[in-house]
């Protein structure tokens, strides 16, 4: 059996996994670039669709030192069908980048991209690209977080806030190339927010915190750095079981980069999310 055949067979298995795991899926058509349109296409799903762009925090000093985290950044678009949207970003401000697709059936229903790098655009000097505003004060709400080496399979994760949070808080478990999911917690009940982690050991993930923001968007609070789930126990039904460490080595997949030309965007669409519902997405994946 040739190496090429084995690789193609492995890629097919990954693609079939994605088909079984998600009722719909999306595809990223080119490498994200600074101030450049990114094209997404998808098939299936129930509108409205929500496309979420997340930038996990960079832990410059210590993963266990919250004060060394950045506030992260996010942009969320709700779409009823074909359409477009834009937001400003810089290469440093949005690398790493993770994209999550959701629809009316729930958060992460369309899958989660691999961890992406935003590369410089050849025309970046010609197109002014303002950086999206962020609120660094939200990170001061967080007083303590479970040490990353204690983030274990089927374990409990706890975040302690200073009392500034009240009401519903969303905690999204972001699993690159895996099954991301949302946990809904009540910050008014306690200053300790705790949730179970039904994710397999060895999986890379991040946690994104947000508040319900109304019909159009959620209010992002902060995003943790990426971390690796440590061995724990098997007392829960693990989700996100496709290890991102393994999947990131693959060049393509149901949710990944499908290299195609990139379109330049002007000031009206700094980073355009050009959306096209396409039944050909499935065929594209298998045409290589």
Image: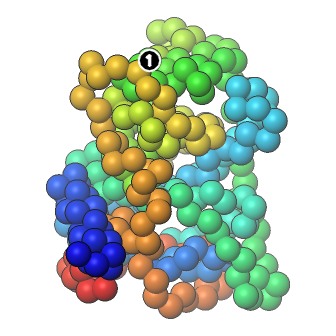
**Quadrant where the C terminus is found in the figure:** bottom left
Q: Depth check: give the residue in front, 22 or 71.
A: 22
Q: Is residue 277 visible?
A: no
Residue 256 horizontal side relative to residue 136, left or right:
left
Taking 271 as reference, is 47 left or right?
Answer: left
Please provide percent x and percent y for residue 95.
66, 60
Residue 64: x, y in percent?
A: 70, 26
Residue found farthest to the front: 1
231 to 56, vertically: above or below: above
For the point 48% across and 28% down, which residue is it?
Answer: 230
Looking at the image, residue 201 sits to the left or right of residue 162; the answer is: left
Residue 216 is situated, as x and y percent measured from the top left of the image, at: 44, 52
Q: How many marks?
A: 1
Other-residue count near label 1 (Cα within 10 Å), few / some / many at <14 / 14–19 / ≥20: some
What residue sits 46% from the left and 83% below the top? 259
The x, y position of residue 208, in whole percent, is 53, 39
Q: Residue at x 30, y 37 (%)?
A: 239
**Residue ID at (49%, 43%):** 204
* In front of the other: 179 or 263: 179
Of residues 205 and 217, the one nearer the viewer is 205
Look at the picture and state if 228 lies above or below 283: above
Residue located farthest toward the top when viewing the structure as drawn: 190
Q: Which residue is mark 1?
A: 156
The N terminus: image quadrant: bottom left
Give the colour scheme of this rendering: rainbow
Identify the element where label 1 is drawn: strand
Please indicate whether residue 43 sits to the left or right of residue 205 in the image: left
**Residue 206 visible to an observer of this rendering:** yes
Q: Quadrant of residue 263?
A: bottom right
């Amino acid at each position: 059996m040739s190496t090429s055949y084995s690789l193609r067979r492995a890629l097919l298995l990954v693609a079939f996994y994605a088909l079984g795991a998600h009722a719909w899926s999306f595809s990223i058509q080119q490498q994200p670039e600074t101030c450049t349109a990114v094209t997404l296409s998808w098939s299936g799903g129930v509108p409205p669709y929500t496309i979420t762009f997340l930038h996990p925090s960079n832990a410059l000093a210590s993963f266990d030192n919250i004060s060394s985290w950045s506030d992260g950044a996010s942009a969320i678009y709700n779409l009823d069908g074909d359409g477009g949207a834009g937001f400003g970003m810089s290469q440093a401000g949005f690398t790493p980048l993770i994209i999550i697709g959701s629809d009316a059936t729930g958060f992460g229903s369309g899958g989660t991209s691999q961890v992406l790098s935003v590369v410089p655009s050849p025309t970046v000097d010609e197109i002014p690209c303002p950086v999206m505003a962020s609120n660094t004060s939200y990170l001061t709400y967080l007083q303590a977080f479970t040490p990353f080496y204690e983030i274990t399979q089927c374990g409990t994760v706890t975040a302690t806030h200073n009392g500034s949070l009240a009401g519903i808080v969303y905690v999204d478990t972001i699993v690159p190339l895996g099954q991301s999911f949302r946990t809904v917690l009540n910050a008014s009940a306690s200053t300790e927010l705790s949730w179970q982690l039904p994710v397999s050991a060895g999986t890379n993930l991040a946690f994104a915190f947000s508040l319900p923001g109304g019909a159009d968007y959620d209010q992002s609070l902060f995003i943790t750095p990426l971390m690796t789930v440590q061995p724990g126990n098997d007392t829960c039904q693990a989700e996100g079981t496709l290890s991102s460490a393994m999947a990131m080595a693959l060049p393509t997949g149901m949710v990944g980069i499908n290299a195609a030309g990139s379109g330049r965007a002007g000031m009206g669409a700094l980073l355009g999310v050009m959306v096209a519902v396409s039944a050909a997405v499935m065929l594209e994946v298998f045409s290589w």
